[in-house]
Each structure stands twice: as structure tokens, then as C-alpha cells.
Amino acid sequence: MKKPQRHPSEVAEIVAIQALSFVAGDPERLGLFLSESGIGPETLRSAAKDPQFLVSVLDFVLRDDETVKAFSASSQLDPTTIAAARQALDPRGQEFT
């Protein structure tokens, strides 16, 4: 039986949620992200429902090579898949390659 195909934006949201979990798993990284995003830890769960917030999570991960490598290793996703997820969530935004 064939697996159902997911829409690219669904896959991108899953990748972004994985990235958020990765960021939240490291107190220092989470503190930096919260400071830069301007949201509090109490609003993380509700913010995760907003596609633009998910874009900001992926932007945070993608801006630093070490963070991308660490998330890539943790999630077993190729960095190009992470960048493609970011692009799928906001096709008008900056493209990481």
C-alpha cells in the first residue's frame, strides 16, 4: 500500500516543529531565540501554530552553520531539506542554499 503524499507546506511545518523542539532542547539556544524573537516561553506552544513564527524558527537555525549541522545531525535531515522547508513556508522570503 502506498503512503499518502503530503503537501510540501505540511512537510515544511513538520520540519519547523522539529527545529523548534531542537532549539527548545538547549537552554542557551532557547534563551537566545526567545530573546531575539521577543516572545516568552509561555507563548511558544501557541506561537508554533503560526506559519510565520515557524519561518522565524527555521531562519534562526539556518543562519549559523554550526546550528544547521547540529540540527541536521539531530533530525537526520539534510541541510538542503531544512532550507527547502523554510522556502516552502515562505516562498517570497529569503532563500537559503
Image (spheres, rainbow, N blue to C red):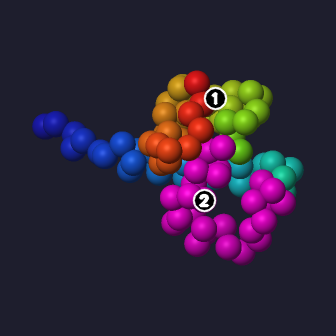
| Magenta highlight on residue 37 | yes
Residue 94 lies left or right of residue 63; in this view the side is: left
Which label number is shown at residue 27? none
Quadrant in which the N terminus is drawn: top left
Residue to which mark 2 is pinned: 53
Kindly identify which residue carries mark 1.
Answer: 73
Highlighted range, magenta: 33-59
Give coordinates of residue 91: x percent, y percent.
47, 43
Q: Is residue 76 visible?
A: no
Residue 45, magenta (yes or no):
yes
The type of residue carrying mark 2 is Phe
Is 9 on the left-hand or right-hand side of 72?
Answer: left
Question: With respect to residue 90, does 69 lie above or below?
Answer: above
> Which of the pair 18/55 is nearer the observer?
55
Total number of numbered discs in the rendering: 2
Q: Residue at x 64, y 52 (%)?
A: 56
Mark positioned earlier in the residue sequence (1 or 2)? 2
Quarter placement of the C terminus: top right
- Secondary structure beneath label 1: helix
Front disc: 1 or 2: 2
Q: Residue at x 56, y 44 (%)?
A: 93
